[in-house]
Image (cartoon, grey):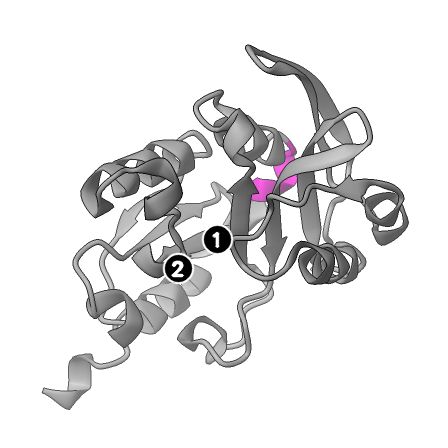
């Protein structure tokens, strides 16, 4: 499978200042930027910065960032699903996961996440892939935003829908463990029927257990 890494960039005017949305970036470029101390959703900032640098250099890895001058204030990642997750149990070269998206509190509400996702979908190569994202409420900053679970989920759905991702049903135990969790996906126009069939098998792996 060929992985296009054609660079795109745009300016985003917000009430808090002008941001550059750009990507995909390689590891060297990622390392050249500072990483904002408020990017703490998944792990301590220094460790997350290091992880993103490594993802950026994977063949399928794509990182898009929002930056204020030379400081990363938001990002979205694309890579193969974690080997420990069900989504990698059937090897698929054309299934990629939107693994993480994060924006610092200062720029929340300024459509930074939507713009990151839209820019990441601009390249025609996305039509060759099934792009999935798994939304788990325990990753959401409910305390920092003051939102309840359902309002936060609505925000996540709107943000993902900006990139053409829609809700898909699944019997995955982690997603099924809470009604706010969900699977969303975008199936590219050139994805072959056999890949869609494999994706359906991954979504419902427990159907023969009943």
Q: How many marks?
A: 2
Establish if 100 lies above or below 47: above
Q: Quadrant of the C terminus?
A: bottom left
Q: Pointer 1: what residue? A: 130
Q: Are marks 1 and 2 in contact (CB under 8 Å)?
A: yes
Label 1: how many residues lie within 10 Å, few (<14), some (14-19) or many (20+)? many
Residue lying at 56% horizontally and 59% vertically, measured from the top left: 94
Q: Is residue 41 left or right of residue 181?
A: right
Residue lying at 54% horizontally and 72% vertically, measured from the top left: 82
For marks 1 and 2, give the one nearer the viewer: 1
Residue 125: in magenta span: yes
Magenta segment range? 123-127
State the separation of the CA atoms marked 1 and 2: 8 Å
Numbered disc 1: secondary structure: strand
Label 2: how many residues lie within 10 Å, few (<14), some (14-19) or many (20+)? some
Residue lying at 72% horizontally and 37% vertically, measured from the top left: 72
Q: Pointer 2: what residue? A: 196
């Amino acid at each position: 499978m060929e992985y296009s890494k054609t660079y795109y960039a745009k300016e985003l005017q917000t009430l808090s200042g002008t941001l550059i949305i750009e990507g995909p970036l390689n590891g060297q470029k990622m390392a050249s930027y500072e990483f904002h101390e408020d990017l703490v959703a998944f792990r301590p900032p220094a460790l997350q910065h290091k992880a993103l640098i490594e993802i950026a250099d994977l063949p399928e890895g794509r990182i898009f960032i929002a930056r204020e001058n030379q400081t990363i204030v938001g990002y979205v990642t694309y890579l193969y699903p974690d080997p420990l997750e069900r989504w990698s149990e059937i090897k698929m070269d054309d299934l990629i996961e939107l693994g993480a998206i994060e924006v610092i509190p200062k720029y929340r509400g300024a459509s930074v996440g939507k713009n990151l996702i839209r820019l990441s979908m601009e390249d025609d190569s996305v039509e060759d892939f099934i792009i999935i994202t798994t939304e788990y409420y325990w990753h959401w900053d409910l305390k920092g935003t003051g939102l309840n679970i359902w309002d936060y989920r609505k925000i996540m759905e709107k943000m993902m829908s900006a990139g053409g991702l829609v809700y898909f049903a699944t019997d995955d135990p982690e997603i099924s463990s809470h009604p706010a969790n969900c699977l969303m996906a975008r199936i590219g126009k050139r994805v072959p029927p056999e890949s869609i069939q494999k994706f359906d098998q991954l979504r419902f792996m427990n159907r023969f257990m009943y």
